């Protein structure tokens, strides 16, 4: 786990933000590495890498988001309460164009789908997948469709300024690149969740560090 100086990600707005230095040789990548969800994971990893390479939001950041948002509480099958526990075959089935996952209940706040989109946000980002060669009607309960929408929203949010989060820098992700800063990852998590919550934001930043391919690592 990343050791965050100062002990908290969401410091008071008038507190100096902690400085987090990437490990030596660290270079951002669209590809995700060493991400073990219990199984081969090839279909899931390939899907994350596809979306990341197209939109420019690191696959590791998307995985960090899914760590929190990917619960499927209405699935009655034991061990299938989270998207990370789905088999490759199940991931493929709910990611195919035009399909919808069978358990897609609305949360108590009105969010739906494996990426937990609110209706107004889905209206703004739901068609993102159609900008990358797909022609089907996007579905909030389709994993591929919602990941494209999430990647677009998180990339846009990553460049925002003036948040309460401690990683408050002004460097936007390079256009079309997954070479983000820690600040980009933190701000995208803050805006996606809608609040600067230590556990949520620090988890996404840790996914960014721990599962982003670094120089010298095999893909």
Image (cartoon, helix red, strand yellow):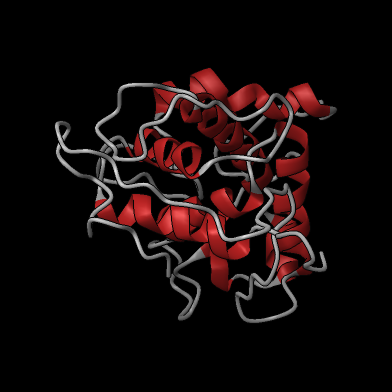
Q: In this picture, is 41 found above or below 154?
A: below
Placement of 25 over or under 162, stated as above or below: below
On-image quarter of the C terminus:
bottom right
Across the whole image, how many numbered discs are drawn on residues?
0
Q: Quadrant of residue 147?
A: top right
Residue 36 image position (x, y, % from top left): 63, 76
- Residue at (78%, 57%) from the top-left corner? 46
Compared to 140, does 61 lie above or below? below
Screen quadrant of the N terminus: bottom left
Left or right side of 37 for 40: right
Residue 87: percent from left, percent from top: 67, 73
Question: Which residue is at the front of the view, 217 or 5?
Answer: 5
Q: Which residue lies at the image location 45% right of the left edge and 39% below the top edge?
A: 183
Q: Where is residue 93 in the image (x, y as percent from the top left)?
A: 73, 57
Can residue 103 be seen from the camera position used here?
Answer: no
In this view, which residue lies farthest toward the front?
Answer: 24
Q: Is residue 169 left or right of residue 133?
A: left
Q: Is residue 178 visible?
A: yes
- Residue 195 placement (x, y as % from top left): 26, 38
Q: Is 94 placed above or below 54 here?
A: below
Location of residue 173 by image quarter: top right
- Work out whether residue 79 or residue 200 is closer to the camera in this orientation and state it: 200
Residue shown at the point (57%, 60%) measured from the top left: 23
Q: At 65% across and 56% down in the image, what residue appears? A: 26
Quick check: 149 left or right of 25? left
């Amino acid at each position: 786990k990343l050791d965050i100086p100062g002990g908290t990600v969401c410091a008071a707005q008038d507190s100096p933000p902690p400085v987090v230095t990437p490990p030596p040789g660290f270079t951002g990548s669209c590809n995700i590495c060493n991400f073990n969800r219990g199984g081969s994971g090839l279909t899931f990893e390939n899907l994350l890498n596809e979306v990341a390479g197209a939109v420019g939001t690191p696959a590791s950041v998307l995985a960090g988001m899914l760590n929190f948002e990917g619960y499927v509480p209405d699935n009655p099958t034991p061990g299938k309460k989270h998207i990370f526990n789905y088999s490759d075959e199940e991931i493929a089935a709910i990611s195919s164009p035009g399909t919808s996952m069978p358990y897609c209940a609305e949360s108590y706040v009105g969010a739906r789908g494996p990426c937990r989109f609110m209706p107004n946000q889905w209206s703004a980002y739901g068609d993102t997948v159609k900008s990358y060669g797909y022609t089907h009607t996007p579905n909030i309960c389709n994993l591929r469709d919602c990941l494209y929408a999430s990647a677009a929203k998180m990339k846009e949010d990553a460049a925002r300024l003036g948040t309460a989060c401690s990683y408050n820098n002004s460097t936007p992700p390079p256009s079309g690149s997954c070479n983000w800063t820690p600040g980009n990852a933190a701000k995208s998590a803050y805006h996606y969740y809608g609040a600067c919550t230590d556990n949520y934001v620090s988890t996404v930043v840790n996914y960014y560090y721990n599962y982003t391919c670094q120089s010298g690592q095999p893909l």
